[in-house]
Image (spheres, rainbow, N blue to C red):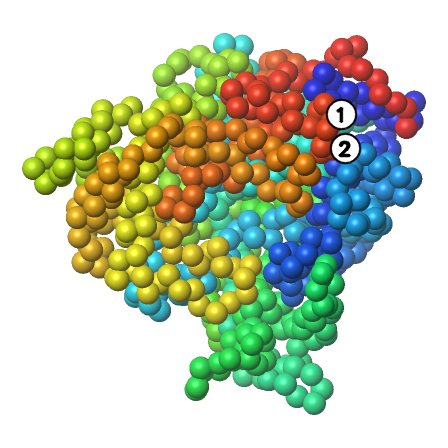
Amino acid sequence: MTGEIFRDPWGIPHLRADGANELARLQGRVTARDRAWQIEVERHRAQGTSAAFLGPEALAWDRFARRARLTDTARRCFTALEREDPETAEWVRAYVAGVNEVLASGGTASAPEFGRAGLAPGHWEPWTPLAVWLGTHILFAGFPAKLWREHVTTLLGAGAVGLFAADGPGTSGSNGWLVAGERTVTGHAVIAGDPHRFIEDPGVYQQIRLSCPEFDVVGLAVPGVPGIAHFGHTGTVAWAITNAMADYQDLYRERLRRTGAGVEALGPDGTWRRAARHTETIEVAGEEPVEVEVVETDRGPVVIGGPEGLDDGVTEPGVPPLAVALRYPPRVTADLGFGALLPLLRARRVADVDRAADRWAEPVNVIMAADTDGDTLHRVAGRVPVRAGANRTRIVPAWEPEYAWQGWHELPRDGLTDGVAVMANQRGPAAPLGVEFAPPHRAERITTLLGRQSRWSAADMAAIHTDTHLASAAPLLDHLAALGAGDLTGSAAALRDRLLRWDRHMDADSADAAAFAAVRTALVRRLAAHPALAAAATPPPCPDIFLPWLALLPRVGYALEHLLVVEDLFGIDRPAAVRAALEEVAAEPPAGTWGDTHRLAPWRALPPSGTPYDEPGLSGDHDCVLCTSPVPGLTDLAARGPAARYVWDLARREDSRWVVPHGASGVPGSPHHRDQQPLWLAGDLAPVITDWAQLTKETDV
């Protein structure tokens, strides 16, 4: 046996080979067959070359990727991997070889997007999977939020920053929970959850099984990256992660000047030092090429402005030209944490996962694990620099020494409470490492639900995945309850009474949920338009890629709960705003249910050809356990949500379950392109099949 590909009834690949490297080659081959268009888009995005076939809309990202030096960082990290961990480097090379075998052989012919985009499959370098990983996660820590804090401080004062924080504006995060054997019907642990990310088509996670004499692992892989990083089950130990919400990327305001020899930056010792500088050209489909100046100081690559300020060269009189450098750990350490990937596959016990987590780098996660011996793990994994507190909240001056990095934090650990651990991006074990976290509602709701039974099974977990209770509705409903009936028209009073009777569940078939969302939208828009806040609606000059973090309306929408309960909101008459929003909706109430407007809106690099997909209506909301996130005040459409769901059973791996929003195949028209969506919508999960006799052999490779 060299390599074999099997499929289960859902088209999920199960791979078997003689060794880890041959298995990696097989994983690369099957990924290129199932997801060729997807991984080629990700390769181009990491390289900053996607505008060449996606057009001007991709230019902002390509410009950022070039200026942030994503490709060069990936090269550096792979070079270091070859030197320090040659076994893993060779394993990554084997994966890349498998990808290239398919791309070069015409195995992508079934992917119609290449023809539509006029793109030929390219060639992967050994460092390409590292570039894909970095490109996927470079904005995960949300460093542009520091631009928002600077912006709102300038316009509204330092006190305004906390008003809009609301523990995580705009974050939909992820859910995960571990139930120890003492709380399960089998006496063995169960781990379950769902990562919340932008819903993409094809999906950001790839269900897969990797089997060789050393290990046999099922889990969710990232297409374009070997192994199973985030969610896996080896048979004797299982693990899962959520975003720790740690702050580990910094923005430095630089003082730059041009000289005859290039560009210099003022350092913290008062000395002007040469900055690395070169020019790159970005090809743009349908338009002229664009030149980008790439500058890197001792802090990091300059991602905003430059020696003359922003690209248009406009600066305020007496104000130094704006130049902001990004400092992020992989650029400093030449380590993306790929050294953890093989040890995770080889893990047999929690202690093995723990040791692998010590090698984790990017992004910073909370990881849970459990094994068949009854051991559990709940800890933070990654790399967070020690530096001044100001670095974590705003742009800091590069020329002042107190803002330099001073080593790395020791990462926190946590335990279980009453046999349960819950992670939902709240202020948990990672609290000392972050600034803004997700609201506590999802974590508290999961804890409450788990407390309702003394014993749980793997089959019980789907009901938690799909819970739609919206705790953050309370402040708005309290404001409605406080309105005097005599101050309302008859229709507004009836709507208020109806909402006060509502069960606070954001179900797709609920007309009351639709009415609540409509009032919320009207209120968010009124608050954002109030003169006290409207000044913050105009973002500061910055690259387009950062504008979503600087938009006022989503900030108000996600922070609404806090804005309604804070003692004073710049003198805004909130009862009057609530009354006006209620009257507005009562005069023209929504005609249907929540699912009529709260519909899935997945991202695609190219729109579907022919008839657009009829995307489904969804239950849930951004603070529900079923976190299908609209942008309150802007749109009810959900671009974020559960990018997968999983239940890992440590008693019997074959009793585990999983599902993705679309299907195992990234090829439109394939029977497995969207066949899991009915399960995903219903909250059901597909079985994890581990018996080779129940699988269909596709080919020997």
Q: Quadrant of residue 385?
A: bottom right
| Residue at the far left in the pictured view | 486
Give coordinates of residue 425: x percent, y percent.
45, 40
Cα distance in 3D space between marks 2 and 1 = 9 Å
Identify the residue shown where x is 24% and y is 36%: 586
Question: Is disc 2 surrounded by few (<14), some (14 to 19) or many (20+) residues within 10 Å?
Answer: many
**Is 477 above or below relative to 466?**
below
Secondary structure under the numbered disc 2 in the rendered image? helix
Dot 1, crowdedness within 10 Å: few (<14), some or many (≥20)?
many
Q: Is residue 169 left or right of residue 519?
A: right
Tell me which amino acid carries mark 2: Asp
Q: Nearer the viewer, residue 56 or 438?
A: 56
> In the rendered structure, which amino acid carries the disc numbered 1?
Pro
- Quadrant housing residue 644: top right
Q: Position of residue 126 (x, y in %)?
A: 82, 49
N-terminal-most mark, 2 or 1: 1
Residue 614 seen in the current view? yes
Q: On residue 304, which mark appears?
A: none
Q: Is residue 226 left or right of residue 526?
A: right
* Pick the front one: 43 or 662: 662
In the rendered view, would you say 603 is above or below 676?
Answer: below
As helix, strand or loop, the secondary structure at mark 1 comes to strand
Q: Name the residue that disc number 2 marks.
A: 34
Q: Are marks 2 and 1 in contact (CB under 8 Å)?
A: yes
Residue 262 position in % (x across, y down): 69, 83
Residue 7 against residue 202 in the figure, above or below: above
User: Of 605 and 29, which appears nearest the observer?
Assistant: 605
- Residue pointed to by mark 1: 13
Q: Measuring 85% from the left and 26% from the top, which residue is drawn there? A: 17
